[in-house]
Image (cartoon, helix red, strand yellow):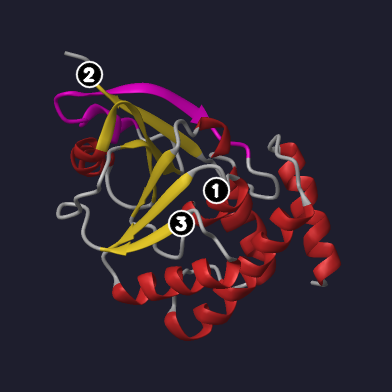
Amino acid sequence: MSAATAQERLDAGMRVLGLEPAADTVDKLLAYRDLLARWNRVHNLTAIRDPEAMLAHHLLDSLAVNPYLSGERVLDVGSGAGLPGIPLAVANPQRRFVLLDASSKRVRFLRQAVVALGLGNVEAVHERIERYRPVAPFATVTSRAFASLADFAQAACELLADDGHMLAMKGRYPDEELQALPFGIRLHAVYELNVPGLDAQRHLIDLVRERE
């Protein structure tokens, strides 16, 4: 796939998602895709190895979460290769993102991506979520294939601002997981994500803490 074709596909997909594909944003997203593809040959960061497939499966899939972010501080739990955190950070330079992962290999990649892309609004942290103690709570906590909804909510709610939202990316509608939510956590909404170029079910589960 030529660079021009990749840019056109990304431009079109971002417009479908309601995002303005500014040249600098598109360039950084494609640079991130290329960096991920290079690292992936050696470090196995993601099962998707084809750079063309990464456009929909990684970049646009992550950006589909964008309308549901709230507040200035966002935590991406189990960020892995930086999904959805890095694409969202590129699209939201006015927000601060923390990418949290327990794997030193993945955090090395995240830190390299932050430097290579010049992302001054991103910090990559090597720590387990259970041990992580941020300087301030987060308005939004995201996850993509991190854990069950119950495990995610149990850990993430400790790092959440009072009116914050926990956004978990899932494939099919997770009915059984929703029924197993821990006490004190409630379902705020479920959004069906229509990702351009991705022929698969995608749902975003929006969880909040019960107000006392």
Q: Name the residue under label 3.
A: 122
- Which comes sooner in the sequence, label 3 or label 2? 3
Residue at the spot 44% in from the left edge and 77% down from the top edge? 44
Q: Is mark 3 on a helix, strand or loop?
A: strand
Is residue 168 toward the left or the right of residue 95 in the image? left
Residue 154 sits in which quadrant?
top left
Q: Is mark 2 on a helix, strand or loop?
A: loop
Location of residue 131 in the rendering, given as x and y in whole percent from the top left corner: 15, 55
Question: With respect to residue 116, does 194 lie above or below?
Answer: above
According to the picture, the residue beneath numbered tag 2 turns out to be 210
Taking the image as shown, residue 210 lies to the left or right of residue 57, namely left
Task: Residue at 57% x, 57% y: name it.
Answer: 58
Question: Disc 1 versus disc 2: distance between alpha carbons?
Answer: 27 Å
* Amino acid found under the numbered disc labelled 2: Glu
Among all residues in the image, which is located at the extreme bottom? 42
- x, y percent for residue 200: 57, 46
* Amino acid on which the number 1 mark rests in the picture: Leu
